[in-house]
C-alpha cells in the first residue's frame, strides 16, 4: 500500500512562502512525476513528503494515517537522491543492508534480501566493492537497491538521473520504469526534464512557483494543457505560442500549436517564413523559422529529411484541429 | 601561464626551506645535544657544538632523582583523557553547528575561538579558587577538565570544518533508512569523519601534552605531568642545564615520535578546508 495525500500543505522558509496551500493525492501503485523548472518547489515538495523538511501548515497522510509529525524513518518511504548519497565507507553489500540493519532485521533475512536486490539490479559482482569503485550508473543502482530492500510504501526519487550521461540516462529510465512495473509500488519522481516525465509517468504534476499548474496523464497534458505554462513546458520542442492578430482570428488571446502539428507544404500554405536554423536529425528535421509575421520564431517538425536550408522560404499549414486556444489569463478555452 | 621554476630557483627554494626548518628545529636539537654534555660543557663559552665527551650521566641522574614513569603516566592520562572527553562533547556540538546551523552559529563559533585570545593568567585566580573549593587541586581529573576546556574551542572548530565537508544528503539518506540520530552519528558521520577526528585528536593530544601554564599552577606532586618534571630541574638549587636538557628530551621524546609518525595526518588536519 502506498497512498499519499497532501491536504492544504504549505511550506515557508522564514518569510518566504515556497509552497502555497496545496492539495494532492497520489494513489497506490502510481508512478507520479513532479516536473517544473528549477526553483519551482518540486524537490521541496518531495522532501516534505519524505519528512526531511517540516511542513509549515497542513497535513500529510500516508495510507490514511496522519504522517505530518512522523520522522522520515517512520513514514515507510525510501528515497533515492540525486547525488546517490551512498555511504562511502561501506561496501555495496553493507550499503544495501543498512536500512535493514537499522530495522533490526535478522541477519539471515538481511542476506536474503540483499542477494535478491543485487540480482534484480545486476549488482551481484559488485557486492564487496566500495561506492568509490563503481561507475555512475552502478552507484545509482546501489542507491535504488538500498531503497527496494526495505519494501517501502513508496519510493521517492529526487532527480536521480541528472548526474548520468545521456546514454546511461535513457537506459536507467527504462530500468526504473521496468522496476515500477515489477514492484507495482507507488513512486514519486522529481525531474526538471519533461522527456523523463512524459516517458515514465502515469501521472504528471506540473509545478511552477510552488503551485500545481496541472495534474494529469502525460497525454492529457500533451493534448489539453490547462494553461500556457503547461503548454510551453510539456512537449519537445516547445509548443509555438502565438499572440496578436493571428490569435484573434481564433477568438483567443494566445494560440498554441505544436511543431509536429504544422505541415510543411510546397507552396501556398497559411503561413510563410524564412528558415533560420535547420536541425537535421535524419528521422526528423526541425526548422526554426523567422519573418512569419506572427511575431515569434516558429518551430516546425518535418518528418524525414527535408532539404530546406538557412534563408530558404518555407510554407506552413497548421492543422486546424490541433490549435490550442488560451484567454488573457493564459487559461485554456475549451 | 604557469610560473616557470628553473632548477636553480628550485635549489634555492629547497635550501631556504631547509634553513628555516633547521632554524625552527635548532632549539630542540641544542637541547638534545646538551643533554649528552657534562654540566661544565653545557655552559661552556664559546658553546661546544659536537666536539664534546658524550655522556649518558645526566639521564641516569635524572632517572635516579625523579620518578619519570609517574610523570609520563600523568601526561598520558591528562592529554589522553582531555582529548577523549573533549571529543565526546565536541562531536555533537560540531554536528549541530555543521548540519543544523542557526543564524547565530557563526557568531558562536567565533565567540568560542575568542576565548583562546584571553590570556590564561586572566582566569587563573577564579579557576584556582574553584579547584580549592572542589578539591581538584593536584588531581588528574581536575587537569583533564581544564585541558579539555581550554582546547574545546579548537576541537569543535576543527570537527566543524571536517563535518562541513560531508554531504548532508548522506546523512539524510541515513535518516530515510531509519537511522536514529545516535545511529546516524555513530555509523555514518563518525566513520566518514575518521581522518578529521584522528587529526583533531592528535593535535589536541599534542597541545595538552605541551601545555605548561595550567599544569604547573594546578599540580604539585600527585598529578604532575612531564612539564612539571622539566620545571623541577630549573629550581631551586640553580640551573643545571645538562640535566634540565636530559629531562626535557625525555619529556618531548614520546610526543616527538608520535608527531613524526603522524605528520602527514597532522598537516592534512591543519590545512583541511583551507583550500577548496
Image (spheres, coloured by chain):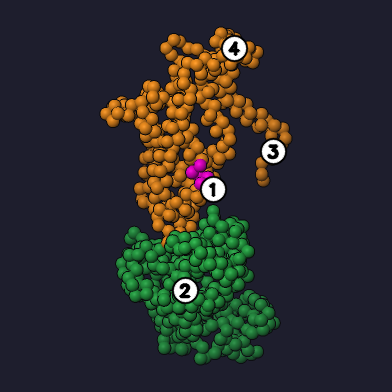
Chain colours: A green, B orange
Q: Are marks 1 and 4 in contact (CB under 8 Å)?
A: no
**What secondary structure predominates along the stretch shown in magenta?**
helix
Q: Quadrant of residue A5?
A: bottom left
Mark 3 / mark 4, whichever is N-terminal: 3
Can residue A99 be seen here? The reply is no
| Quarter of the image where one finds residue B108 | top left
Give coordinates of residue A201: x percent, y percent: 50, 78
Mark 1 secondary-structure assignment: loop
- For the residues tagged 3 and 4, is the chain the same? yes
Query: Tag 1, which chain?
Result: B
Say what secondary structure mark 2 lies in. strand
- The residue carrying pointer 4 sits among few (fewer than 14), some (14 to 19) or many (20 or more) residues within 10 Å by Cα, namely few
The structure residue drawn at horizontal position 50% and vertical position 87%, both measured from the top left corner, is A323
The span picked out in magenta is: B194-198
* Label 2 environment density (alpha carbons within 10 Å; few <14, some 14–19, many ≥20): many
Mark 3 residue element: loop
Q: Earlier in the sequence, mark 1 or mark 4?
A: 4
Q: Residue at x 43, y 58 (%)?
A: B179
- Structural distance between the alpha carbons of marks 2 and 3: 58 Å
Indicate the chain on which mark 4 is placed: B
Are the residues under marks 1 and 3 on the same chain? yes
Q: Looking at this rendering, what residue extends furthest in the left direction? A: B133
Q: Position of residue B171 (x, y in %)?
A: 45, 57
> Quick check: B117 left or right of A307?
left
Can you tell which of label 1 and label 4 is closer to the viewer? 4
Amino acid at each position: 500500500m502506498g497512498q499519499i495525500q497532501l491536504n492544504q500543505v504549505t511550506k515557508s522558509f522564514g518569510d518566504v512562502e515556497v509552497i502555497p496551500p496545496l492539495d494532492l493525492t497520489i494513489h497506490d501503485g502510481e508512478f507520479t512525476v513532479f516536473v517544473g523548472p528549477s526553483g519551482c518547489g518540486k524537490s521541496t515538495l518531495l522532501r516534505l513528503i519524505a519528512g526531511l523538511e517540516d511542513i509549515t501548515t497542513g497535513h500529510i497522510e500516508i495510507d490514511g494515517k496522519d504522517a505530518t509529525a512522523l520522522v522520515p524513518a517512520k513514514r515507510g518511504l525510501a528515497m533515492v537522491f540525486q547525488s546517490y548519497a551512498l555511504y562511502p565507507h561501506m561496501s555495496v553489500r553493507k550499503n544495501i543492508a543498512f536500512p535493514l540493519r537499522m530495522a533490526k532485521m535478522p541477519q539471515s533475512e538481511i542476506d536474503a534480501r540483499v542477494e535478491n536486490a543485487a540480482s534484480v539490479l545486476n549488482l551481484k559482482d559488485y557486492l564487496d566493492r566500495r561506492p568509490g569503485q563503481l561507475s555512475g550508473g552502478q552507484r545509482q543502482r546501489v542507491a535504488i537497491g538500498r531503497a527496494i530492500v526495505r519494501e517501502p510504501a513508496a519510493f521517492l526519487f529526487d532527480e536521480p538521473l541528472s548526474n548520468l550521461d545521456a546514454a546511461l540516462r535513457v537506459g536507467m529510465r527504462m530500468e526504473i520504469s521496468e522496476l515500477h512495473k515489477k514492484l507495482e509500488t507507488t513512486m514519486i519522481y522529481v525531474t526538471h526534464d519533461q522527456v523523463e516525465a512524459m516517458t515514465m509517468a502515469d501521472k504528471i504534476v506540473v509545478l511552477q512557483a510552488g503551485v500545481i499548474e496541472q495534474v494529469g496523464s502525460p497525454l492529457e497534458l500533451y493534448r489539453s494543457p490547462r494553461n500556457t505554462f503547461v503548454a510551453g513546458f510539456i512537449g519537445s520542442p516547445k509548443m509555438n505560442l502565438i499572440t496578436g492578430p493571428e490569435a484573434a482570428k481564433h477568438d483567443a488571446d494566445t494560440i498554441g500549436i505544436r511543431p509536429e502539428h504544422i505541415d510543411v507544404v510546397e507552396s501556398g500554405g497559411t503561413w510563410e517564413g524564412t528558415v533560420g536554423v535547420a536541425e537535421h536529425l535524419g528521422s526528423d528535421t526541425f526548422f526554426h523559422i523567422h519573418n512569419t509575421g506572427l511575431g515569434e520564431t516558429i518551430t516546425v517538425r518535418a518528418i524525414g529529411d527535408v532539404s530546406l536550408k538557412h534563408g530558404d522560404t518555407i510554407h506552413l499549414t497548421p492543422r486546424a484541429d490541433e490549435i490550442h486556444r488560451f484567454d488573457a489569463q493564459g487559461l485554456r478555452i475549451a | 601561464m604557469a610560473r616557470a621554476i628553473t632548477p636553480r630557483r628550485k635549489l634555492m627554494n629547497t635550501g631556504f626551506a631547509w634553513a628555516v626548518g633547521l632554524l625552527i628545529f635548532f632549539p630542540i636539537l641544542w637541547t638534545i645535544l646538551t643533554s649528552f654534555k657534562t654540566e661544565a660543557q653545557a655552559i661552556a663559552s664559546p658553546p661546544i657544538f659536537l666536539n664534546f665527551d658524550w655522556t649518558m650521566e645526566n639521564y641516569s641522574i635524572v632517572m635516579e632523582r625523579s620518578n619519570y614513569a609517574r610523570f609520563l603516566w600523568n601526561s598520558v592520562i591528562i592529554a589522553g583523557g582531555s582529548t577523549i572527553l573533549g571529543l565526546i562533547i565536541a562531536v555533537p556540538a560540531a554536528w549541530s553547528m555543521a548540519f543544523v546551523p542557526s543564524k547565530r552559529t557563526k557568531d558562536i563559533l567565533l565567540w568560542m575561538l575568542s576565548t583562546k585570545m584571553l590570556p590564561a593568567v586572566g582566569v587563573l585566580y577564579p579557576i584556582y579558587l574553584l579547584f580549592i573549593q572542589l578539591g581538584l587541586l593536584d588531581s588528574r581529573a581536575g587537569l583533564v577538565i581544564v585541558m579539555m576546556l581550554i582546547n574545546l574551542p579548537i576541537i569543535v572548530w576543527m570537527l566543524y570544518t571536517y563535518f562541513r565537508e560531508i554531504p548532508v544528503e548522506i546523512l539524510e539518506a541515513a535518516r530515510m533508512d531509519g537511522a536514529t540520530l545516535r545511529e546516524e552519528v555513530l555509523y555514518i558521520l563518525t566513520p566518514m569523519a575518521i581522518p578529521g577526528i584522528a587529526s583533531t585528536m592528535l593535535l589536541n593530544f599534542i597541545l595538552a601534552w605541551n601545555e605548561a601554564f595550567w599544569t604547573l599552577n594546578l599540580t604539585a606532586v600527585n598529578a604532575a605531568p612531564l612539564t612539571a618534571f622539566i620545571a623541577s630541574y630549573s629550581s631551586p638549587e640553580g640551573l643545571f642545564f645538562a640535566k634540565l636538557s636530559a629531562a626535557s628530551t625525555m619529556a618531548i621524546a614520546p610526543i616527538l615520535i608520535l608527531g613524526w609518525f603522524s605528520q602527514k595526518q597532522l598537516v592534512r588536519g591543519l590545512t583541511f578546508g583551507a583550500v577548496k
